[in-house]
Image (cartoon, rainbow, N blue to C red):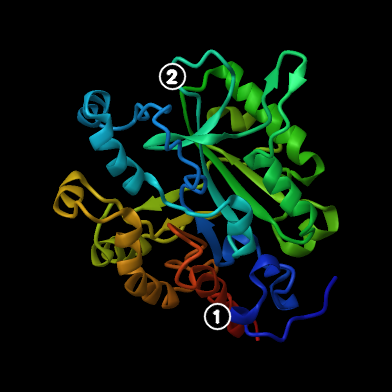
Amino acid sequence: MSGCSELSLRELPMESWMSHLPCALWDTPLYHLAIPGSHNAVTYCLDMNDRSPVDPMQPDMLQKLDKYMKPLIRPFVYKWAKTQEFTIKHQLDCGVRYCDLRIAHRPNDHSTDLYFYHGVYTTLTVEVTSRGAQTLVVLTVLTEIKEWLDSHPKEVVILSFSHFLGLNQELHVRLLANIRDTFASKLCPKTEALTLRNLWALGYQVIASYEHSISSSHGDLWPHIPYWWANKCRAEALIEEFEARKQHGRPGGFFVTGINLTEDLKYICTHPTESLKDLVMSTYPALLGWVREQTPGPRPGSLNIIAGDFITESHFAPTVITLNEKLLKWSS
């Protein structure tokens, strides 16, 4: 094990911050630490070439407008659907350790390819795709994460697989097989104590959360992680919502507080020249100011994973990670 860190947590190298945490935190359960997360982590590669339909979860009106007025509507869809700008590897290098992965099978697609989606589908697939006797040599998202973990053996990631738009039982089985084939011995079983010291000793680096009843019958799949979503387009309203939720206490295990703002049709129509990034960047000072006041740990009102949009901006990850200094003060 590496020695105890004497750096301020804000000064830790973001690509390996877990391995540099003070040893006083090595036995703290991960669900009591403050962990940076990426909301809709794989929207940096949305299909921009109009090959992708609008996903069926979008309002009927938008789907009809996109069908008949695609050149006019698509630029708006892209501007407001893109929540991250950089690859999953870059996000991990910037300190993210929770990835919100929303999985879909495209409608009228006769292949078994699985994609990510938000408004439209991604160009990247979830895993390597077989074509008869040949396998496409493509660095897909899961293999990219695996290779990053190989080069960062003491970092742990929490992968939240969810939403599963258009997946049948056969596709779930296929996805589970790919998760296991990709991460193999890195997958942490549900029986293990989730502390860094224990995970390092056993070589586990991936906690795979799966938002489907199938997870209950698989020992290497963790149940769905609750995600606090405020559904607000103003920072003040989002903060007010979360302060109210904190009054009822925190869930017992992992949970996510999503400081991601949600635009509605009215907001988009009244801000036609803006994008989701414009909204996020204008509100990050207020949102991160609120984050700095939060405390991780087991107490009622404490937070755990904090997820946001455009997480490579505005010192998002260091702000979240620095909250763990408050746990050090309690233990001293």
Q: Nearer the viewer, residue 159 or 141?
A: 141
What residue would you read off at disc 1? 326
Placement of 315 over or under 114, stated as above or below: below
Can the viewer see residue 196?
yes
> Residue 280 appears at what percent x and percent y?
34, 62
Placement of 31 over or under 183, stated as above or below: below
> Residue 100 appears at what percent x and percent y?
51, 47
Residue 247: quadrant of the picture: bottom left
**Residue at 32% over, 73% down:** 286
For badge 1, the amino acid type reads Lys
Quarter placement of the C terminus = bottom right
> Would you call the spot at circle 2 few (<14 residues within 10 Å), some (14-19), or many (20 or more)?
few
Disc 2/disc 1 C-alpha distance (Å)? 48 Å
Indicate which disc, 2 or 1, sits on the residue closer to the N terminus.
2
Residue 25: quadrant of the picture: bottom right
**Residue at 28% over, 60% down:** 241
Query: Helix, strand, or loop for circle 1?
Result: helix
Horizontal side of residue 13 vs 154, given as left or right: left
Horizontal side of residue 247 vs 20, given as left or right: left
For badge 2, the amino acid type reads Pro
What residue would you read off at disc 2? 107
**Residue at 59% over, 66% down:** 33
Query: Helix, strand, or loop for circle 2?
Result: loop
Q: Nearer the viewer, residue 101 or 138?
A: 138
